[in-house]
Amino acid sequence: MRVSRRAESIEPFHVMQVAKEAHALAATLGPGQPRMIFLNIGEPDFTAPPLVQAAAAQAVADGRTQYTAAMGIAPLRERLSAWYQSRFGVAVSPERIMITAGASAGLQLACMLTCDEGDEILMPDPSYPCNRHILTAIGARAVLLPTTAASRYQLNAAQMAKTWGPRTRGVLLASPSNPTGTSVEPAELQRILALVAERGGAALMDEIYLGLSHDERYAQTALAYSEDVISINSFSKYFNMTGWRLGWLVLPPALVPAAERLQQNLFICASTVAQQAALACFEPDSLAEYERRRAAFKARRDAFIPALRELGLGIPVMPDGAFYAWADASPWFERLGVSNSTELVQLLLRRAYVVVTPSTDFHQQDQGTHIRFSTASSMEDLQEAAQRLKALLG
């Protein structure tokens, strides 16, 4: 059977390919061999806290498992609205919030809302690969603009103005970003939003790591600056509900009816059980636990990134959020007999039993020099990984 050109055009997600290979190798390790340390996937080692788990079990026991409205259950949209007010001091009406089947579904809906076939969206390079593949899948195109450490690996308004063309529809930014863990400077973000509004474009903000900001300078939603932003968010990262596949969109009021129509036809609704469980995320005990966990992620960052720098990796910008380290590994190549980050990842996997991710996914302009570490694992795993890497380097 013929596969569509659209499906064939989607590149593999190397993060998941590496994970698959690492798990297969881990299954062969016997007694006396080191265990595999996974620093490749951006998944918190914490799971949903007790109140969230209990709420899910109660929803199933009570039979609250049928379809919800396409926009999501009203109590969850109301709690999210209250969270924006209490956490960020921003008024977001519940009517603007749509509950989605994870941030991935939210990104698909946002791209479909704003792009026609042939349209272009400006994005930074490096960036999360699935975002550009979603655009490809709907017949649009990501225009990747090179960034450097000097710009915190983020775009700026002047760069966008020079690149904006007749098919440019808008911009998709992530703040904090995957793979760099860096955020857009607030003043620059406001300049970007003003430019997009002036050009009649769409501003899509991937804010799924916003709850995991470690620097108050960057810990503000773009919704504070404009009601026209489309914010994509998730219960996966800050709320530790990765496998529950639950996210949300905050939409400009004019886009809500079209978004609801798309949701009705493409997804019907997000998981009912996950929605009922997520209500408990906003209980005081749960919020206190999330803040304790955020502090733990910061402590891991503060310990692990200096350790990587001491080993000679280039990390010029300390991540201000999320749980990633985007590292120039080229200083290791000659010492370890490899020529690029893909080969290095394989060597670390098989000789140090440490799993990381090559730059292939994230950076089209990169010449295979970078690797991404996830610092979402335990402090013990991070310390052990640093010791193994040090031993490997001799």
Image (cartoon, rainbow, N blue to C red):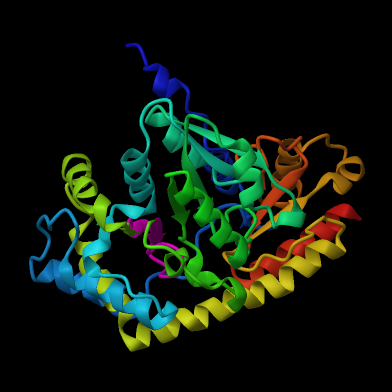
Residue that appears at 47% across and 64% down: 222
Asked if the stretch drawn in magenta spans residue 237, the answer is: yes
Seen in the image, is 177 located left or right of residue 73?
right
Q: In this view, does 284 lie above or below 310?
A: below
Residue that appears at 35% across and 11% down: 2
Q: In this view, does 94 lie above or below 131?
A: below
Residue that appears at 57% across and 80% down: 295
Decide which of 221, 359 is in the foreground and name it: 221
Q: Split into 4 quadrants, where in the image is the N terminus? A: top left
Seen in the image, is 353 located left or right of residue 57?
right
Residue sitting at the far top? 1
Residue that appears at 37% across and 31% down: 138
User: Dividing the picture into quarters, in which one does residue 8 lie?
Assistant: top left
Residues in magenta, as a range? 229-245
Decide which of 284, 70 is in the foreground and name it: 70
Decide which of 65, 254 is in the foreground and name it: 254
Asked if the stretch drawn in magenta spans residue 55, the answer is: no
Q: Where is residue 334 in the image (x, y as percent from the top left)?
A: 91, 41
Q: Where is residue 16 in the image (x, y as percent from the top left)?
A: 52, 42
User: Dividing the picture into quarters, in which one does residue 380 lie?
Assistant: bottom right
Decide which of 300, 261 is in the foreground and name it: 261
Q: Split into 4 quadrants, where in the image is the C terminus? A: bottom right
Residue 56 visible, this orientation: no
Q: Position of residue 376 (x, y in %)?
A: 57, 65
Q: Is residue 42 above or below residue 76?
A: above
Seen in the image, is 232 located left or right of residue 389?
left
Residue 135 visible, this orientation: yes
Q: Where is residue 98 in the image (x, y as percent from the top left)?
A: 25, 58
